[in-house]
Structure formats: structure tokens, C-alpha cells
Image (cartoon, grey):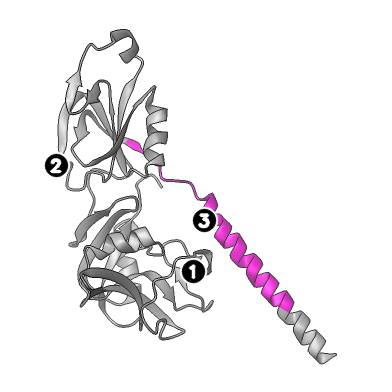
Amino acid sequence: MNYFIIFSALLITNFLLNSSYCDRCCAINLRKLPSYKLNRIGARSDETIISRKIVQDLYECKKFAASRKALAFNFGLNINLNGSTIRNHLRNEASKRNLCQALQCPEIYNSSSLIRDKNYRYYSMYPNYINSGGGTIVCVPEAGLFILSDNNLNYTQAQMFCQKLNGSLAHVISEERMNGLAKFLSHKIPRYVGLSNNDDEKIWKNSFGCEPLLCFEYRAWGTREPSNSRGCVAILTSSSNSHVTPFWKVIPCYVPLPYICEIFPRYQ
């Protein structure tokens, strides 16, 4: 009888925990994508174009840019083909169409690469000016903007500093994010990111949105990691045969380390 009661209690507990995780995981799928807003009239960005399309209106351009995971786009009133501008081409039809250029990265340093062009408008998920907090701003295509800080802070201090910059310790539970950040990392220098298991719940969570690691399929634990059931995660890289592999390493949360902030899109 006692075994039956214990078994039933475990089943109920497991059900409640799974229901709780389901609710929190479902919230990830329901999260709205950041929106693009007008940053500059009469200008276009010279950032890398990942795709372009002739569109009927601005709404179609926004949808196209989002489908390409573009972080910004140029919306033009003229039609560009192969680098040359075609004006007065099919005048009646062209007046109804516009050129949409999906951009790999947004403007970062005070719109330094914007080019004056009265036929264009520049839209971005991010503001023209971003406070780096003394760190280095980098763009990871399809993921967003990040700040690599060389200040040594413990995990809590690093998270608070990122929040002051309108961000959070970086969300790294995806292959594209880890591989994108790996290009800027040294294998000798671990950096805190937004993954920890240091509160009363005792589960690994994404600090970026308080989402349990169980909500994601991706894992990047290093060899013999997680080495502790409690702690905070830093990322670093290992090299073998000219191949760089980023991985997660558990560090005691009180240890001062450099860190990576992820900047929230302005219109999230």
C-alpha cells in the first residue's frame, strides 16, 4: 500500500512538473518576433544584403525581411538590378513596386555606413546608437547584436550590467548563436552567458527569458560537463584540425569573468 501511495505521488509530481515546463516552453513559441521600425528617411545602409525582392508595399517588405531573418532592411522606390539603377523602366508598373533589400546586420556605430539616397528608407530592429558599455559590439547574422565585455564580474553583476545596457546575458541555446559567437572568442578566455542553475528551482535556465533548458533540443556541454549540479555557464572554444568548436563550461557563479551581453531589439 505504501509503495502504491509513493508511486502515485511520484506520478502526480512528475505530471505537475511536466505541465509547468510545457506552459513555459509553449510561451517560447508564442513569443512575438521583434518588429522593424523606420530609422532614417532618404538613406540606405551599405551593410551586406542577404536577399532582395521587388515588393508591392512596405508590409510585404517587412514580411520578406523577417522570412530571411534579416536584422534590418532598405526599402527603395527605385529598382536595382546587378548594381545598376534602372530609372523610368516600365514607369507605370514600377510606380506600384518597390525594392526590398534584406540586410544581414543593422547599423551599429552611429549609422556610419548609411548612404544618402532620396529614394530609400532604412528600417531596423535596433536604434542607430547602441551603448556598448565599454565593450565591443558584434553582429551575429540571424541572431542579433552582442557586446563582448572584458570587465571581470561575477554572474549576478554581469547580468545587472547587461540589463543597464538594455539587454541580458546572451542566449546561447542554439547552434547558430554558438557558432556565430565562436568567431569572436578565444579558447583561453571563458565568458559568462545567460545559462545558469543557481536558484531555488535547481534547473538549468536561460537567463534571457527564464526558460528551462528542457524547452530546447540543442546542447553544447563540454567534456565531462555539466561538472556540477549548481553553477553558471561560460562559453569558450577548443581547436582541432583547424576546426573551432564552442562549448559550455560550468563555473562557480561567484568567480569574476568577462561576459557576453545580448542587446534587446528596440521594439521587442
Quarter the N terminus occupies: bottom right
Q: Is residue 218 left or right of residue 159?
A: right
Label 3: few (<14), some (14–19) or many (≥20) C-alpha neighbours in 10 Å:
few
Tell me what residue is drawn at x 32 percent, y 44 percent. 71
* Magenta residue check for 21: yes
Q: Which mark is residue 112?
A: 2
User: In this orientation, which residue lies closer to the viewer: 165 or 260?
Assistant: 260
Q: Secondary structure beneath disc 1?
A: helix
The type of residue carrying mark 3 is: Ile
The type of residue carrying mark 1 is: Leu
The residue to which callout 3 is attached is 28
Q: CA distance from mark 3 to mark 2?
A: 35 Å
Q: Which mark is residue 213?
A: 1
Q: CA distance from mark 1 to mark 3?
A: 12 Å
Percent position (x, y) of residue 140?
28, 54
Percent position (x, y) of residue 226?
42, 81
Q: CA distance from mark 1 to mark 2?
A: 38 Å
* Magenta residue check for 240: no
Q: Which mark is residue 122?
A: none
Percent position (x, y) of residue 63?
42, 35
Q: Tell me the quarter of the picture where residue 19 sits.
A: bottom right
Magenta segment boundaries in residue numbering: 11-37
Tell me what residue is drawn at x 18 percent, y 38 percent. 46
